Each structure stands twice: as structure tokens, then as C-alpha cells.
Image: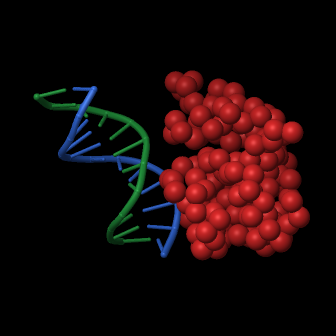
Chain colours: A red, B blue, C green
Amino acid sequence: MSEQYWLMKSEPDVYSWDDLVAEKEGMWDGVRNHAAALNMKTMKKGDLAIFYHSNIGVEAVGIIKISKEAFIDPTDEKGKFVAVKVKPVKKLKNPVPLKAIKANPKLAEMDLVRLSRLSVGKVRPEEWAEVMKMAGEKV
DNA sequence: GCCAACGTTGGC
DNA sequence: GCCAACGTTGGC
């Protein structure tokens, strides 16, 4: 199994975890950053990702699954950037705030910590396991 | 092709 | 609301 793990940021007043749950499947569009777009192109159907609330809350709130691999973002007039589709898997028992992630030396290398402005980052399997532990979830 | 100026994102 | 970090743009 070569599953990959990701972290996707959203501002909850624009698109929150509850919005995604209400929709059942959400389109992750509007990404206009090449590094983030590259990560999205690397995603495979079935990959898991952390849903993270930026600005308000500033914490990891849930687990999502990639349900459709990268396709041209319909909101991009130039047709250069991509979007993916995601489905909610489960809400974390205990949301993991950025503060706690920063305080954990095992997570110091996360894209989230090192590249705070990147909206779609990679998560290493051992980092994934650590965050899940902090969230009170079984891996 | 380099680099300064500017705009945007995101944490606090 | 402020500021730091980073990406992008544009002059040379």
C-alpha cells in the first residue's frame, strides 16, 4: 500500500468542515499556488488528508479522502490550475491546534510548520501517525 | 536572468 | 490590525 498523506487548509468562514460534511463531497478548487498545485497533481484517489482550519480555529479538525484526482479547475479561466474532490471521513475526536503541532519536536519538519503559507502540503506517514495520536484517534 | 518592490497569506 | 514569510512581477 503506497498511500500518501496530505494536509489541506481552508478558512472556515469560506469553507469549513461542517460545509464539507453537509455537501458530502466537496470540490477543492481555487488553489493558485504552484507548489500546492503540484501536490494536488500527485494525489491519488483514496489518499487521506488532514482538514485544517486556518485563521479561525487554527487547528486540524478532520480526516478527508481524495475522491477524484486532479482535473482542470473550472474556476480558473486560464485552465492552468487543478482541483480535486474530497469526501469527509471522520471528525477528529480532539482537534489538534497548530500550537500543539509546533510544540511537538516530531512534527517540526511538517510542511505546515515550515511553509506556513502553503495551502496543500505533504504529511509523512510518521507525522500522520503522530497527529492521529494527538487527536485521540487510532491509526 | 537577477533582484528590488509589491501583494497576499496566515499566525498572532 | 500588524507583521513576517513567501511568491510574483517588472525594470534593467
- Inspect this view and state whether residue A23 appears: no
Q: Is residue A31 left or right of residue A137?
A: left
Please name the residue shown 75% across and 52% down the image: A125
Residue A100 in view of the camera: yes
The image quadrant where one finds the N terminus of chain A is top right
Residue with the most extreme top position: A79
**Position in image of residue A22 (x %, y %):** 82, 54
Query: Where residue A39 sits in the image (x, y, percent)?
Result: 63, 38
- Front-most of A128 and A121? A128
Residue at left 77%, top 34%? Answer: A44
Q: Quadrant of residue A3?
A: top right
Q: Position of residue A110 (x, y in %)?
A: 60, 56
Q: Judge whether A100 appears above or below A78 on screen.
A: below
Q: Residue at x 60, y 74 (%)?
A: A103
Q: Nearer the viewer, residue A105 or A55?
A: A105
Q: Position of residue A45 (x, y in %)?
A: 81, 35
